[in-house]
Image: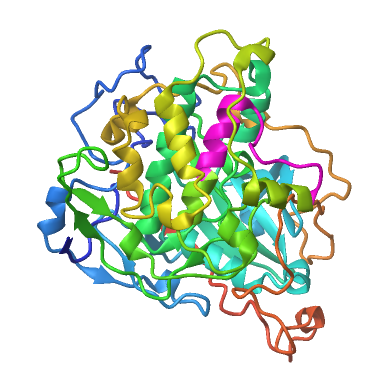
């Protein structure tokens, strides 16, 4: 192996005004026009943007610095930056700048609203989090980590953050409005609630590209599931919800992996992003049916948990259910730890017509769902191992964003109507224009398995009490939640 210095971040998304191959909903209601066939023919000159750069770029010297937006009490590691990095803008934003349109979704500590900027008339998804609920549930550190990740992340398959700010009782994340809604709901509306193998491969490839980017920056996502994947207006995916993510205290340098064995790796040198994450955590977090065996065992886990969850996601996209779901929590845990992976026949699904899944597809799922994390695909060299597997041979990762997605949001629907989101009735109305934050956010439940005292959450006597928020003389646990406005490169 050859060690290297830092590498540049992925270039800016091509969803930008005036670009010949794309059109952002922020500037035009039309969808991205793409070729009718699913080929990797470029619409514009080749730009390696969907994943990590060519390994030839690794010999180039790049600068390494820590953005001020990441200097929170919850993160202390260095972060790779480049000329494509986001920049902070000295513009203050508050709830009065937005008009609430409708409720898009709700969780255990807050809700997400479709809002419109009063000046620019642009649509955004505004995530509103209750401070008291976060204090009560020991999620103070998690929201700070999420802000740090969203402020740093700049990748076409990760939801962009534009503003973050706070009021007396709430924290706000102003995010890209993904017109296509939750990937979970899109799957539920498909015939048989399944995808064909080539369709599942496309979305799995985009997830691999996003996870590779996160691992490159020393981050473990830890909560991959259809509910946390959003569909952009173009039909491409965007990962969201980083409150369960964890960042390595120190971000290692990527290395080059070379192998003479064609069975494991291609002949071209491959980028090893696994070496960037130097963290092993014992936190019991994640979604029940997606938990990796090492998380259940509690002996610590690393970035390989993301490859396990990708295996579960790929299985669910093809079969319509997860492979180890039990009748209750303990039964599910037992199946994850002991049950052999089974591939059912499609004959029982009347909506499916076509061949059974290929041996290559079964192979990559088996390797991703290896219960021994040390033998799991991706453990040796990260995403490069997955991308060199025969299952992804039809995919040109450099041109993913120029391929036609299997699911395209409606071209006729007005984005402001949010037709791809389930209608949710507000039990209590939330007023953005209110001068005092006395109205409670709608609460909901999330199907996640997490302990009340994780190693990456505050616990014990030092945990701030919710009464601190009502007494200005007491310590404010959210004092360092910075008000941030980001400038995202247009090219």
In the displayed structure, 439 sits above or below 280; it is: above
Q: Which residue sits at x=80%, y=80%?
A: 470
In the displayed structure, 281 sits above or below 400; it is: below
State left or right for residue 398 relative to residue 145. Answer: left
Number of numbered markers: 0
Image coordinates of residue 305 in percent, x first then y, are 51, 55
Image coordinates of residue 58 in percent, x first then y, are 16, 56
- Residue 264 in view (yes/no): yes
Seen from the viewer's position, the closer of residues 194 and 107 is 194
Inspect the magenta stretch and tell me whether residue 313 lies in it: yes
Q: Which residue sits at x=33%, y=27%?
A: 402
Residue furthest right in the image: 427
In the displayed structure, 284 sits above or below 8; it is: below
Q: Which residue sits at x=49%, y=41%?
A: 238
Q: Which residue sits at x=43%, y=78%?
A: 76
In the displayed structure, 282 sits above or below 233; it is: below
Q: By what rule are the colours in the image chosen?
A: rainbow
Residue range in magenta is 310-329
Question: From the image, which quarter does the N terminus lie in?
Answer: bottom left
- Residue 123 in view (yes/no): no
State left or right for residue 266 relative to residue 475. Answer: left
Seen from the viewer's position, the closer of residues 371 and 225 is 371
Question: From the image, which quarter does the C terminus lie in?
Answer: top left
Inspect the magenta stretch and tell me whether residue 356 lies in it: no
- Answer with the quarter of the image where residue 68 lies: bottom left
Image coordinates of residue 214 in percent, x first then y, are 41, 55
Image coordinates of residue 435 in percent, x first then y, are 76, 64
């Amino acid at each position: 192996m050859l060690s290297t210095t830092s590498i540049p971040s992925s270039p800016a998304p091509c969803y930008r005004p005036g670009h010949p191959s794309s059109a952002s909903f922020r500037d035009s209601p039309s969808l991205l026009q793409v070729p009718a066939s699913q080929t990797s023919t470029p619409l514009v000159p080749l730009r390696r943007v969907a994943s990590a750069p060519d390994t030839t770029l690794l010999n180039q010297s790049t600068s390494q610095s820590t953005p001020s937006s990441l200097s929170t009490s919850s993160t202390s590691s260095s972060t790779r930056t480049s000329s494509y990095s986001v920049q902070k803008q000295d513009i203050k934003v508050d709830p009065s700048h937005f008009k609430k349109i409708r409720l898009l979704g709700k969780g255990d500590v807050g809700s997400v609203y479709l809002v419109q900027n009063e000046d620019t008339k642009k649509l955004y998804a505004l995530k509103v989090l209750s401070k008291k609920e976060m204090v009560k549930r020991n999620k103070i550190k998690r929201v700070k980590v999420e802000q740090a990740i969203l402020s740093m992340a700049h990748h076409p398959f990760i939801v962009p953050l534009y503003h973050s700010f706070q009021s007396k009782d709430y924290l706000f994340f102003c995010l890209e409005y993904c017109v296509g809604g939750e990937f979970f709901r899109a799957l539920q509306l498909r015939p048989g609630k399944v995808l064909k193998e080539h369709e599942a491969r496309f979305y799995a490839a985009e997830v691999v590209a996003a996870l590779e980017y996160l691992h490159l920056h020393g981050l473990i996502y830890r909560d991959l599931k259809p509910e946390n994947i959003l569909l952009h207006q173009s039909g491409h995916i965007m990962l969201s919800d980083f409150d369960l993510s964890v960042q390595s205290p120190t971000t290692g340098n990527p290395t080059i992996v070379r192998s003479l064995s064609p069975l494991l790796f291609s002949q071209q040198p491959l980028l090893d992003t696994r070496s960037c994450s130097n963290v092993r955590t014992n936190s019991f977090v994640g979604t029940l049916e997606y938990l990796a065996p090492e998380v259940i065992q509690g002996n610590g886990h690393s970035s390989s948990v993301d490859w396990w969850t990708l295996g579960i996601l790929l299985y669910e996209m093809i079969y319509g259910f997860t492979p180890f779901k039990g009748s209750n929590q303990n039964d599910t845990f037992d199946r994850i730890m002991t049950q052999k992976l089974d591939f059912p026949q499609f004959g029982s699904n009347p909506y499916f017509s076509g061949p059974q899944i290929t041996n290559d597809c079964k192979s990559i799922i088996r390797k991703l769902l290896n219960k021994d994390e040390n033998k799991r695909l991706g453990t040796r060299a990260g995403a490069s191992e997955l991308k060199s597997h025969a299952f992804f041979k039809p995919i040109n990762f450099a041109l993913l964003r120029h391929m036609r997605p299997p699911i395209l949001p409606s071209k006729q629907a007005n984005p402001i109507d949010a037709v791809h989101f389930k209608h949710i009735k507000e039990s209590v109305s939330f007023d953005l224009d209110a001068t005092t934050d006395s109205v409670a956010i709608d609460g909901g439940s999330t199907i996640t398995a997490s302990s009340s005292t994780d190693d990456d959450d505050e616990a014990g006597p030092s945990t701030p009490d919710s009464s601190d928020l009502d007494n200005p003389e007491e310590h404010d646990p959210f004092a360092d939640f910075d008000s941030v406005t980001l400038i995202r490169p247009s090219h």
